[in-house]
Image (tube, coloured by chain):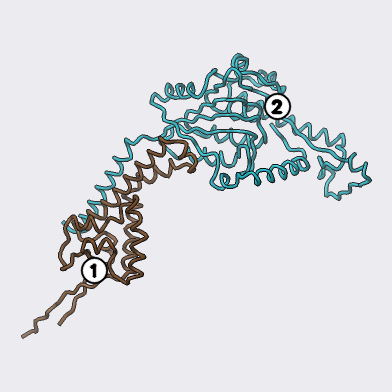
Chain colours: A brown, B cyan
């Protein structure tokens, strides 16, 4: 008679190094594929700042591009994490986004936890504030993750 | 459907959205470049730097959205090399190019304007001055007056030609005149080619004379009397589309910061002194 193996899956908060690496991979994908058509336009149009001050039309065009890029970056993380519970970067490193009980988060939760991906003021401030708070408090969660009651975890299997 | 397929699907979806978002947004399709003041090869000049202008123009050629170029010229010329470099860069562009001569489009300034497809000037613009000068400062008599002797050991007979500390020898003057003449011929040939005129016709106008816009028009040096509005109208007729202009930058951040009064004053004195003393046999258009 063979012994029956019991596999217990436990979720632990992902280490900060893996999270940063996952973010770097996502940024690479975003830059290479998702926002490439817009960013190339912006780079082609981008004049010296003093021209922007004189050319209101150009400034408004660039603002529109920037806002569209911000929406695409936000959409990338929200869609990926809502449908797959992980972005491609997290996927590569085996990270998962879960709710407080290890459950699949809802759309509102996902949207809220990704407010830092909206690269427009005042959400832009989160990019600075959140890492600072994480470092200061030692919390494994970003501020917007605490608000949305979500966690970035990695799954470990314990065999008994 | 695997999670990888879903992830790829989302990326493709967002990419398509980005493409669609980029397409209808208004974008400048005609660049406006200012050629102001003295033309210089240096990147750090109060006039127009050919190095920077060439960079800008070459960058335009890689932008498929740019279909036209308006060059606003207000320059009396300057370095022959700078004028030639800018004119070459203008001609390399495979788009419709128009020059609008504002106050002055003379000498090298005119050379640049002539490299475009259509030259516009106001009735009062100063156009032409096709010619080359070479100047040098000589203070040998001043040195003599103060009992100062100039001695220079050179590796060749003409190595110190144009030195301000000695009189120009007759054979040196001949050499300089030959260089000026060669530069003049190149200038004339370039204008003749650019304006589809014969070299003899341009040669007859190339005695350094200036022309006002109306006369320049009758001589074939320009194509139209008008302003930038007429340049836009010309481009719209040529491109068969609405023109949205955007200005190419003329100053860098560094220059904006360094344009304080003290900096400009010090730079002006230093440059003036250095240029006066060291402008040995430089070819100017």
Question: How many numbered discs sit on the rendered protein?
Answer: 2
Query: Who's the residue at 18% across and 58% down the image?
Result: B2
Quarter holding the N terminus of chain A is bottom left
Query: Who's the residue at 29% across and 61% down the image?
Result: A89
The residue closer to the viewer here, B162 or A60, is: A60
Which residue of the protein is positioned furthest toward the left in this rendering?
A1
Q: Is residue B141 left or right of residue A87?
A: right
Which chain does the numbered disc 2 sit on?
A: B
- Residue B131, which numbered label? 2
Q: Is residue A47 left or right of residue B258?
A: left
Instruction: Using the rendered image, report if marks 2 and 1 lie on a common chain.
Output: no
- Badge 2 crowding class, 10 Å Cα cut-off, few under 14, some 14 to 19, many 20 or more, is many
Which residue is identified by label 1? Answer: A153
Marks 2 and 1 in Cβ contact (< 8 Å): no
- Residue A81, which numbered label? none
- What is the C-alpha distance between the residues marked 2 and 1? 76 Å
Which residue of the protein is positioned furthest toward the top in this rendering?
B218
Give percent across and percent down for residue A17: 34, 69
């Amino acid at each position: 008679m063979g012994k029956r193996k019991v596999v217990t899956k436990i979720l632990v908060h992902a280490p900060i190094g893996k999270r940063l690496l996952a973010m770097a991979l996502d940024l690479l994908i975003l830059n290479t594929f998702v926002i490439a058509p817009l960013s190339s336009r912006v780079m082609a149009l981008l004049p010296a700042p003093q021209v922007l001050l004189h050319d209101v039309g150009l400034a408004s065009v660039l603002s529109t591009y920037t806002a569209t890029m911000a929406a695409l970056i936000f959409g990338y993380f929200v869609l990926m994490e809502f449908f797959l519970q992980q972005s491609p970067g997290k996927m590569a490193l085996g990270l998962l986004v879960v709710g407080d009980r290890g459950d699949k988060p809802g759309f509102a939760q996902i949207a809220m936890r990704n407010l830092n991906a909206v690269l427009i003021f005042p959400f832009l401030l989160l990019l600075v504030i959140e890492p600072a708070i994480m470092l200061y408090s030692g919390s494994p969660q970003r501020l917007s993750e605490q608000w949305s009651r979500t966690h970035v975890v990695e799954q470990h299997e314990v065999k008994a | 459907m695997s999670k990888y397929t879903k992830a790829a699907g989302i990326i493709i979806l967002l990419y398509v959205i980005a493409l669609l978002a980029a397409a209808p947004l208004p974008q400048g399709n005609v660049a406006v470049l200012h050629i102001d003041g003295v033309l210089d090869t240096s990147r750090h000049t109060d006039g127009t730097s050919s190095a920077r202008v060439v960079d800008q123009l070459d960058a335009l050629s890689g932008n498929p959205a740019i279909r036209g170029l308006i060059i606003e010229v207000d320059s009396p010329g300057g370095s022959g090399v700078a004028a030639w470099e800018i004119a070459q860069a203008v001609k390399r562009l495979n788009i419709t190019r128009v020059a609008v001569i504002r106050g002055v489009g003379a000498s090298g300034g005119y050379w640049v304007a002539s490299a475009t497809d259509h030259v516009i000037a106001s009735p009062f613009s100063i156009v032409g001055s096709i010619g080359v000068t070479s100047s040098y400062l000589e203070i040998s008599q001043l040195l003599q007056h103060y009992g100062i002797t100039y001695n220079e050991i050179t590796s060749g007979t003409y190595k110190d030609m144009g030195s301000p500390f000695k009189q120009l020898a007759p054979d040196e003057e001949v050499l300089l005149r030959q260089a000026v003449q060669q530069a003049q011929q190149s200038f004339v040939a370039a204008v003749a080619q650019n304006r589809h005129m014969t070299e003899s016709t341009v040669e007859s106008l190339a005695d350094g004379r200036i022309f006002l816009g109306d006369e320049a028009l009758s001589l074939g040096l320009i194509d139209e009397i008008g302003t930038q509005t007429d340049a836009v109208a010309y481009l719209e007729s040529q491109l068969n589309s609405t023109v949205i202009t955007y200005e190419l930058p003329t100053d860098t951040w560094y220059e904006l910061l360094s344009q304080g009064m003290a900096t400009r004053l010090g730079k002006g004195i230093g440059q003036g002194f250095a240029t006066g003393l060291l402008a040995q046999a430089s070819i100017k258009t």
